[in-house]
Image (spheres, rainbow, N blue to C red):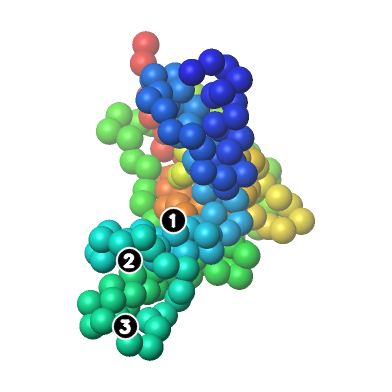
Amino acid sequence: MNARDRARYVDDLLAGRRPRPFTPDDFEAAQIRTAIELQAAQPGGDEPRPEFLSDLHRRLASQMDGTKPSTTTGPTTGASRRQVIVVGTAAAAAAAVTAVAADRLALHAGGGDATASPATTSELTPNDGTWQRVASSTDVSETGMHRFELGSLSGFVHRVDGQPEAVSGVCTHQGCKLWFDQSDDRLRCPCHTTSFSPSGQVLSYQLAIAPAPLPKIKVREHNGAIEVFAPTEPV
């Protein structure tokens, strides 16, 4: 496949059209996977298209009856018992597809901006780490998030009821670095319209499945400084 055909294939995927099938190499397969992820991340990406359900109905009826599929949605007067079963089975299969999509959409109903139910939050605990300073005590408040970078560890620290708390600054979907939206008081992923609360819980997303909450990071206040337990850099 040449570059023009490959670009057309990706454009068809992003536009929700059925592309022409071909056998891709490793590079082409990587591009197609990226296009599929981008298309799935769009609002309504989990909804089955009406033409898909209609085509599924016709295909099942054709395969089970051994005849050319009819455009009629229900059995006509005098239809055989077998025809009634075929049409009913196809309709049930289409309904099952719709039900599965509805279940998945329920995960992020309301335009992907509903507050998610609290999920279990993990904690980043390195096998070999030390307490490292990330800010002075006066730099960390309850009205904002203080970002820090310590080698491979990226995170945010803030106060809750006067005590410091820290969470990872990396999105749990694909590892994008988060940024703090002061006006909405949430951490946002710049890649897939996902946001987290300052405590790390998922607030909104436009993915097929909700990402995991942000892991907590061990933090303490010591001698006028905020310190986190971070991995020791290799010598």
Q: Is residue 228 left or right of residue 126?
A: right
The image quadrant of residue 30 is top left
The mark closer to the camera, 3 or 2, is 3
Q: CA distance from mark 3 to mark 1?
A: 43 Å
Residue, disc 1? 209
Q: CA distance from mark 2 to mark 1?
A: 32 Å
Bin the neighbour count of mark 3 within 10 Å (Cα to Cα): few under 14, some 14-19, many 20 and up.
few
Question: Going from the N terminus, do you reach mark 2 or mark 1 first?
Answer: 2
Q: Nearer the viewer, residue 89 or 166?
A: 89
Residue 156 seen anywhere in this rendered image of the structure:
no
Mark 3, secondary structure of its residue? loop
Residue 105, image x, y percentages: 49, 66
Residue, disc 3? 79
Residue beneath the point at 41% across and 80% down = 74
Residue 15, image x, y percentages: 62, 44
Residue, disc 2? 61
Residue 162, image x, y percentages: 59, 60
Residue farthest along the front direction in this orientation: 78
